[in-house]
Amino acid sequence: MARRITLLFITKDFTHRTERSTYYLIQALKKHAELLVWHEHGDIQSILRQCPKTPDFILLNDFKPDYSPFIRNLKSASVPYGIIMHDLKYKMKHRKAFIEKESVRHIFSIYRDPFKKWFPEFLSRMVWLPHHVPINIFKPYNEEKDIDILMSGALFEHIYPLRHHFYTHYKDDPRFCYIPHPGYRDVDEQEAYYVGENYARLLSRAKLFLTCDSVEHFPVLKYYEAAAAGTCLLAPLNAELRDLGFQADENCVDISAVNFEEKVEEYLEDEEKRKQIIQRAVHFIRENHSTEVRAKQLIGHIVKILQSY
């Protein structure tokens, strides 16, 4: 039996965040590695001295203050290290400088094609690590399908023009339900926000869920969450989404500004067709994009990196 690697994951605490992908990933990683988690700012040498054992690999959760504490002298670490990159547009110039200054050789990017576009000089260092969802939370619930058309999230027209277009079209339609974005922050479990299981149950109540991939064509997390939770996903597809396995009329419905209204009516009317899409989507996410699957893939990537040293 192969030895479990020891992984030092340096990250902010996402336990009570509205978006908890990092928290879910930590829980999954604990099953497959000796996981050490660090939440505080500090010098990497001081941090390593405080670890109960020397890690095989250090993973920094992005160069972004709401994702990771500030770590000094990463380059001085005697073990291999890498970084996860979430929000690729955040301070690109500073992030590139950080990668160069700290000699970051291993970059796990959530998005593939935008990384190629904005960070071509680091393409040889990039490993594609797409979004994921915990399928014990994002799953079909035994909820009444009492929402015909659901949308959630930010509506900034310059970022999500198609989402804004959908909202403008349906906002006065009694069949339509819109849930605003709660913001990226900590929330109390008792607060009435649609996060975690509450959000998954809301998705499960919807017959159809509309979203878009933004002006940058990011395969955003909403695609995965909706597909996993038992609603029929209607959203535009792009090359990266197709390579992830999202297939029009198989596990989702590809829509545009031109045909969305027609597709909404078609899939509201045809319950059997809608149910087949949902069933295949749930299976697709479980097999390919669960947090458990992604954690195993991440460990596999790190093991390969370690074998190269």
Image: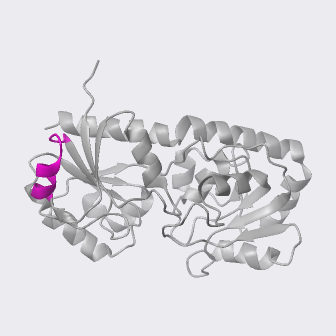
**Number of numbered tags placed on the structure image:** 0
Rendering coords of residue 114 (x, y %)? 42, 63
Quarter of the image containing the N terminus?
A: top left
Q: In front: 191, or 102?
A: 191
Q: In front: 309, or 13?
A: 13
Rendering coords of residue 58 (x, y %)? 22, 49
Q: Residue furthest top?
A: 1
Q: Residue at x 67, y 72 (%)?
A: 163
Rendering coords of residue 248 (x, y %)? 69, 49
The magenta stretch spans residue 47:
yes
Q: In front: 157, or 183?
A: 183
Q: Is residue 179 above or below residue 50?
A: below
Q: Is residue 20 above or below residue 309?
A: below
Q: Residue at x 30, y 41 (%)?
A: 35
Image side of residue 188 versus residue 4, left or right: right
Quarter of the image containing the C terminus?
A: top left
Q: Residue at x 72, y 46 (%)?
A: 230
The magenta stretch spans residue 262:
no
What's drawn in magenta, residue-wise?
Answer: 44-56
Task: For residue 279, say whether it is visible.
Answer: yes
Q: Is residue 245 above or below residue 203?
A: above
- Quadrant of residue 101 within the rendered picture: bottom left
Q: Residue furthest right?
A: 269
Task: For residue 253, say whether it is visible.
Answer: no
Image side of residue 288 versus residue 49, left or right: right
